[in-house]
Image (cartoon, coloured by chain):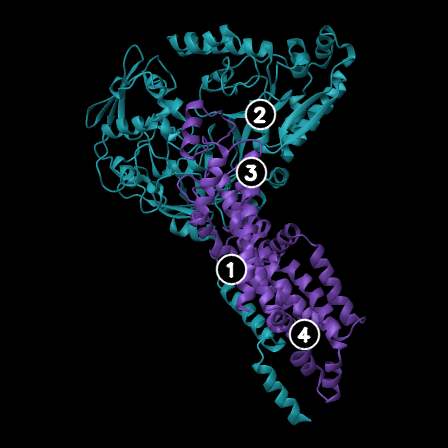
Chain colours: A cyan, B purple
Amino acid sequence: MRYSHNVYLRFSDSVKLTSSTLFKGIALFGLLMVLTSCGTSENNVATGNRTGTLHWGNGTEPQSLDPQIATGVPEHHIISSVMEGLVGKDRKTLMPIPAVAESWEVSDDLKVYTFHIRKNALWSNGDSHTAHDYVWSWWRALQPALGNLYAYMLFPIDNAQQYYEGEIENFDQVGVKALDDYTLQITLGNPTPYFLQLLDHYSLFPVHQTTIEKFGAADERGTRWTYEGNLVGNGPFSLSDWKINRRIVVEKNPLYWDAENVKLNRIIFYPTENVTTEERMFRAGQLHVTNDIPADKIDVYRTQKNPALHLAPYLGVYFYRVNINTPHLSDRRVRRALAMSIDRESLTRNIVKAGETPAYAITPPGTIGYQPPQELGFDPEGAKQLLADAGYPNGDGFPATEILYNTNEAHKKIAVAIQQMWKKHLNIDIQLLNQEWKVYLASESAGQYQVSRAGWIGDYVDPNNFLDMFLCGGGNNRTGWCNEEYDRLILEVAPAMKSHKERLAIFAKAEKMLLDDMPVLPIYIYASKRLIDPSVKNYDSNLLDQASYKDIYLDGESPVTMQVDK
Amino acid sequence: MFRFALGRLFQAVPVLLVVITVTFFLVHSAPGGPFDADKAVPPEVLKALEAQYNLDQPMWQQYLSYLGDVVQGDLGPSFKYSGRTVNELIGAGLPTTAELAFYAMLVALGVGITAGVTASMRPNTMQDYIPMSAAMIGICMPSFLLGPLLVLIFGIHLEWLPVSGWGDIPGDKILPSITLGTAYAAYIARLSRGGMLEVLTQDYIRTARAKGLSEPVVIAKHALRGGLIPVVSFLGPAFAGLLGGSFVVETIFQIPGLGRFYVQAAFNRDYTLILGMTVFFSTLIIIFNLLSDMLAIWLNPKLRQEIRGSN
């Protein structure tokens, strides 16, 4: 008996698919996994603090690192670590500070800017960095074939728009001149008070001509010049590794003009698409800084008084567009009634909850000292009266109206709240319609909506960036609203103003016209939300949510203090 | 066998053609385009972009030129990730997804077969009920629940394992493999129990027992080969499913695999990437089905006879 048993066991050993080999395989696999898991005593944050490596949650995989093609915030973070413009921004106040240009002069008519470029500024491959680089870079930025979505950022420059639109063929007529290797003269079409700010937008960063031409034509999209090993920049860091959907690593650039003041050795950007996963990564010490916080976690961090929680005002406005070509919404009394019956205080306190503030105007208050008119606060009685005046006493006969939003839990909550407020205060029926992002964009652009959710994040800190959205027929207007006097104020009167104060007064006048007609219902001003490990120093929340990577340093030793953002 | 395989591959060509055609016209007819953004795109820019990606040509012309490229193995440039080709993106994600699928498959087979065989040995006793109830829970438990649960326990509370990543931190492959493998383990457990129960009533098993063989030998030597045939024929579709269906797990664990690209591509209207991924996955599914059929034939003498007979 025993003998035969052994024979069969030997037989079974030679058969491939048997339970014993399978069990061995599983045991081996398990053992391997356990073995590889040993030695995880130190997490990313601890290692990073020791080696000067910042682990940064960056939202998504960047579309491109070409500053004249990229358009998103994640791209911005990486690009601003590897490239730099003529002028930078103070990380707290956002006021312009010298960057590649060590100084500049502005002519009395505020139209001619002369920049003096640092002689010790170099490209990361050691090439000298000159005024000619800017002339070439901005020529490239204005080539229509490149498909630069931010070409309009250059339009304040004299003749730039005309060149871009093909009215002028000769780039020499555009107001960008290299007076010598280190002096760049820029002539504007009109005085543009925010021009210095634009220079810190990545679409105006210089790009390295030789590298771009090595990998394709200057105006060719999607060449390989931005890949690791190819990219030549002029920023405090240089690109060393790019693993798709995994990580992007930038290392300190020893040739950077201010390298001695750059404290980090390395930044690793992670495409943390899922906000819940990102928060778990943060809790497990895999990230120093997150890109966002799950909405339902904010209260938890707040109650704990967790020093990692960073909430700060963000230069953006959440609003509803009203399609004024809808018959019953073409009456401005109706639109005003809708605006006056939204209780934004309650909405921001009970629903969005992350430090957002109620918005009663399209421009965030305090945008370089601008205070927009704050009319049409919460006034349900007044709203009821207005609706009655418009022919719908107590909401009677008001046609069913639809709020369109792109599919998203947060947008839905807000739409439901507003639906209830309008039902309660105006007694009107509102339906909700959610569409997938691209479908929603198509519907909104085609004017196939009645009321539609929208958001706008500023690219530069100036009321112009918000108010020029509603010019007649503007691509971002989409409400059908048009007022020629408004256009004149924004396009002609405001730029010609001599003083900052007068200019802001013109904007206030224009914004009042917009709010009187209410083609948009401002709802709240955005807040930036991040979890930041207390070892991260010199990170200051600012209106543009823009980090100054060259200033950041890591200190895991110092005592943890509660950081309060105002 | 060779002729059988060749015939099946030949049949795959019209299948792929239909898949490409339907997908091509579906993605192009979806509302919204690849370059729509919340900030309006100026008409000059849109024109330049459409010209660059041949979107300004008539639809049939775009279709034909796409087909021509696919035949040559070129899946085109991605619209969203400027400068990346679809081939490159698939090449970047495939090794990770394949590795994840492989480990998940090991988990699924190891746990599934053990549970299924154990259960089949004493049907309708606790030894059957316990693993089979666990399997039922495994089938019902979606990975978007199991994943975060495992992360909370092993990643955050016990701090034994990393909560995300793939190949970055030692041990970060364990939780995703278990999460992805569990649903399949449960399925395999049910399949192998069913297969084993059927085989264990056969005459040749009775003969083996009558010879006086011990139960483990009967199971390992005689019953497994026949009892696991349902599992084997499930392997092909399962492996293809693991490759294509790992999106949720890849998202939960921040894994740079193919699944995330596929879903993002659809949201971005990245036409070439959607098409490329669809072609790629269709090909994979066809190949894996063929392989598992061939394996089943190799294991099952009856099927072998049929093939020979038909030839």
Q: Are marks 3 and 1 in contact (CB under 8 Å)?
A: no
Is tag 3's residue or tag 4's residue first in the polypeptide sequence? 3
Label 4 sits on residue: B226
Q: CA distance from mark 2 to mark 4?
A: 61 Å
Say what amino acid the circle numbered 4 marks.
Gly
For numbered disc 2, what is the local secondary structure? strand
Mark 3 on the same chain as mark 1: yes
Q: Is residue A400 above or below residue B159?
A: above
For numbered disc 1, what is the local secondary structure? helix
Specify the label residue A82 is tagged with: none
Can residue A60 be seen at all in this image of the molecule? no
Mark 2 on the same chain as mark 4: no
* Label 1 crowd bin: few (<14), some (14–19), many (20+), radius 10 Å: some
Residue drawn at x 49%, y 65% as measured from the top left? A36
Label 3 sits on residue: B25
Q: Are marks 2 and 1 in contact (CB under 8 Å)?
A: no
Give residue B206's position: percent from left, percent from top.
76, 83
Label 1 sits on residue: B99
Q: CA distance from mark 3 to mark 1?
A: 33 Å
| Mark 3 or 4, closer to the camera | 3
Q: CA distance from mark 3 to mark 4?
A: 45 Å
Give residue A452's position: percent from left, percent from top.
62, 23
Pointer 3 chain: B
Say what amino acid the circle numbered 1 marks.
Glu
